[in-house]
Image (tube, grey):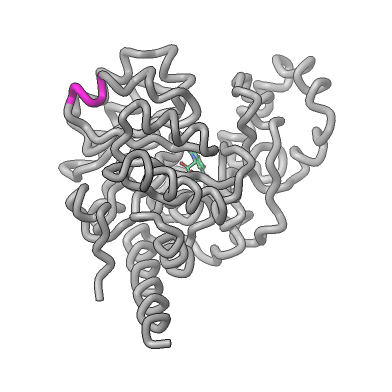
């Protein structure tokens, strides 16, 4: 049994798994490894940095990969979109902004447009923008997301796509870290999954080992959605999105005191960024989702993908037998 879906057909990949474009975490080595394992790796272009993008595309070698951006930030640096499209990526993914801002250029370049959405209204906007693939992202996710849960958002968006845009494919994201999650996502009506946190804890991810160790020690109860990490980094995120990180001394210090933090943000920023550079697990954000409770080791990305697919096939096979 192999998991062939409309996603594997459309993208010409072996397994229905996309590697999430985790900003500055999913570099060329990780994206290349996900593609080599039979999924599609997507570079984490994040807020956008021209030099980083060139370096990481080069590190991916000849692997066929995509690239993703944080949309509201990309809209301030539109030249980065042209820079990435010049690499002829397998897909261009945008999240956290109206995809209509970018869709014409992506589609003119003949590149698959992937739109990550957090609500049904966002999904409708993605359809209107001509998305080829919609990623329905639940609040379980690591990093930024909205407040809807994967379990209900995915089937709701599946129904919307079936009615309004049957050729648009659907991936589920948020809390999918093993074969059980992959199998469940397919049952909910998705054509595949987008995996972030599980690949964050991979050997190829650009993550400090202290942070990976903290995530392995934590469980799903140990994460929180909050804004303090963005305030300290001086990023102005739209109100509808919060960031999931591990609960630690930093998140607990500023819980409910965001206005106070905002007032001191400029002063706190240098110390915060120094903590990021040294991998301080207590005084900066540790960017992992509820899936942290299913992560007990840092593994090569290829082994993670292989294990997910094997377990999903087993689960789906035994469900058929039952
Ligand atoms: C460390 C980290 C960074 C992320 N950065 C981005 C980003 O820059 N752009 C984006 O669209 N999504 C980003 N995400 C969200 C992922 O695209 C994806 O929705 C999420 O990881 C899926 O949930 P999971 O973490 O439970 O697998 C990030 C997630 C993590 C964990």
Position of 41 with respect to 145 (left or right) is left
Position of 178 with respect to 131 (left or right) is right
Position of 306 with respect to 135 (left or right) is left
At 56% from the left edge and 53% from the top edge, which residue is drawn? 152
Between 103 and 303, the one lying in front of the other is 103
Q: Is residue 106 magenta?
A: yes
Residue 321, compared with residue 160, is above or below; it is below
Between 34 and 182, the one lying in front of the other is 182
Residue 260, compared with residue 172, is above or below; it is above
Residue 75 image offset from top left, x and y in percent: 42, 15
Q: For the stretch drawn in magenta, what is the main secondary structure? A: helix
Q: Is residue 283 magenta?
A: no
Q: How many marks?
A: 0
Instruction: Tell which residue pokes out farthest to the front in this image.
Output: 163
Q: Which contiguous range is marked in magenta?
A: 105-109
Residue 15 image offset from top left, x and y in percent: 27, 60
| Quadrant in which the N terminus is drawn | bottom left
Q: Is residue 153 visible?
A: yes
At 19% from the left edge and 43% from the top edge, which residue is drawn? 64
Which quarter of the figure has residue 291?
bottom right
At 75% from the left edge and 38% from the top edge, which residue is drawn? 250
Q: Is residue 37 visible?
A: no
Residue 280, compared with residue 193, is above or below; it is above
Residue 66 image offset from top left, x and y in percent: 28, 38
Position of 300 with respect to 88 (left or right) is right
Residue 139 image offset from top left, x and y in percent: 60, 46
Which quarter of the figure has residue 60?
top left
| Quadrant in which the C terminus is drawn | bottom left
At 39% from the left edge and 71% from the top edge, which residue is drawn? 312
């Amino acid at each position: 049994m192999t998991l062939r879906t409309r996603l594997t057909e459309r993208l010409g990949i072996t397994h229905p798994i996309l590697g999430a474009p985790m900003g500055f975490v999913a570099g060329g080595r990780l994206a290349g490894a996900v593609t080599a394992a039979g999924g599609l790796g997507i570079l984490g272009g994040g807020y956008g940095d021209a030099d980083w993008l060139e370096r990481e595309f080069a590190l991916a070698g000849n692997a066929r990969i995509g690239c993703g951006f944080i949309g509201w930030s990309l809209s301030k640096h539109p030249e980065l979109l042209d820079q990435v499209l010049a690499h002829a990526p397998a897909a261009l993914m945008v999240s956290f902004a109206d995809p209509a801002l970018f869709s014409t250029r992506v589609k003119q370049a003949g590149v698959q447009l992937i739109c990550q959405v957090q609500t049904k209204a966002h999904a409708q906007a993605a359809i209107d923008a001509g998305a080829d693939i919609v990623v329905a992202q639940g609040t379980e996710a690591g990093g930024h997301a909205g407040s809807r849960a994967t379990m209900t958002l995915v089937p709701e968006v599946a129904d919307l796509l079936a009615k309004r845009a049957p050729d648009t494919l659907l991936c589920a994201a948020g809390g999918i870290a093993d074969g059980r999650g992959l199998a469940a996502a397919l049952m909910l009506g998705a054509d595949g999954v987008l995996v972030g946190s599980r690949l964050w804890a991979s050997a190829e991810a650009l993550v400090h080992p202290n942070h990976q160790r903290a995530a392995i020690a934590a469980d799903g109860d140990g994460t929180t959605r909050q804004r303090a990490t963005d305030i300290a980094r001086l990023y102005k995120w739209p109100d509808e999105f919060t960031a999931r990180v591990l609960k630690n001394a930093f998140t607990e210090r500023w819980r409910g005191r965001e206005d106070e933090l905002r007032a001191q943000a400029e002063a706190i920023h240098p110390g915060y960024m120094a903590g990021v550079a040294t991998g301080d697990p207590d005084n900066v954000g540790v960017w992992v989702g509820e899936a942290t409770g299913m992560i007990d080791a840092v593994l090569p990305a290829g082994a993670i993908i292989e294990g997910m697919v094997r377990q999903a096939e087993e689960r789906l096979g035994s469900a058929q037998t039952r």
